[in-house]
Image (cartoon, rainbow, N blue to C red):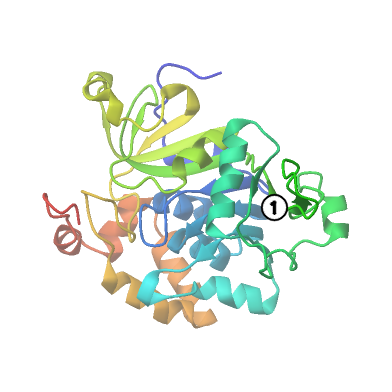
Amino acid sequence: MKTNNKIISLSDAISKFVHNNSHICIGGFTLNRNPMAAVYEIIRQKIGGLHLYVHSNGQGADELIGAGAVSKLELAYAGTGRFAPTCIRFAKAACAKSILIEDYSNYQMTLRFMAGAMGVPFLPTTTSLGSDIIKKWGFSADIRKQDKRLPADKLIVIDNPFEKEKRASKVVLVPAINPDIAIIHAQTADSKGNVRIEGLTFSDTEQAKAAKHLIVTCEKIVAPEELKNNSGLNTLPHFCVDAVVEAPYGAYPTACFKRYDYDSEFLKMYEKYAKDDLLYSKYLDDYIYKTKDQADMLEKNIGNMRLCALKADADKGY
């Protein structure tokens, strides 16, 4: 049951809501607002077998895959701009076939989360008609039969039932996503669970409303009265949220609009480590397993001077 005070530690939130074989989704877009503190905590707790849904994620998805936490992935895109146009550990896992991957278009993934948020089993679109997204499935019919959580089909193409002409146009039906848990990062939230995301929300709102449970990490927890001011700027109401975690620099090394930019030095370093299996194992040890939380990781490996250099310009937001 949801209570008035939803503040919880990150380690407790992850252990309570994320378990082996959970179906989870994480918010953010490529280099922006990935819930990295939560991602690192999932890895730290050595949770595995996850069925991961992302829209166009980057660093978060790549590190979960690199740590061996993911068994199945549904996505539109995984990359971190010029640092990794295709995420490195994701690409390695795809080539090694160590995880199962099913891809959709950007718009289709948004519609799938939206269908989940709306409580409908699917939504129609015309996107991907004529593309191999229609033809190529990541999960076979046998896998779909074995896993009751998977829809019977990746998608279904039908004639437009409202078309009067004999030769009806086609529409694509994409199935809803209803994960066990969604994790997003925001700039501010209050103890009750009201959330304010500044800047682009990407598909975070739809993911949050589609999931059975929602963890929100935020840069700062503020008094409820503060979010009542200009309440039209709030993104999510309290009844959507199960847990609120204050996690300064919780999106690092990705960007958090109006707070800090992404860390290009870290991402260049990560690229080097991610390309080599032995180096990546060392990376996991030094940056995650040997640190107790995000604050400890930042103190030991990044330093306050570099964090200060990433602070966003007050006018531009980056």
The local secondary structure at tag 1 comes to strand
Kindly indicate the quadrant of the structure image that contains residue 299. Answer: bottom left
The correct choice, above or below, for 174 with respect to 17 in the image is: below
Image location of residue 249, percent across then percent down: 29, 50
Image location of residue 210, percent across then percent down: 57, 36
**Residue type, mark 1 in image:** Val
- Kindly identify the residue that appears in the image at 11 percent across and 49 percent down: 314
Kindly indicate the quadrant of the structure image that contains residue 270. Answer: bottom left
Residue assigned mark 1: 172
Image location of residue 52, percent across then percent down: 61, 53
Q: Is residue 71 visible?
A: yes
Image label count: 1
Q: Quadrant of the N terminus?
A: top right
Kindly indicate the quadrant of the structure image that contains residue 238. Answer: top left
Q: Quadrant of the C terminus?
A: bottom left
Q: Is residue 12 visible?
A: no
The correct choice, above or below, for 52 with respect to 132 in the image is: above
- Kindly identify the residue that appears in the image at 32 percent across and 54 percent down: 296
Q: Nearer the viewer, residue 98 or 86?
A: 86
- The answer to whether residue 177 is left or right of residue 77 is right
Image location of residue 294, percent across then percent down: 35, 52
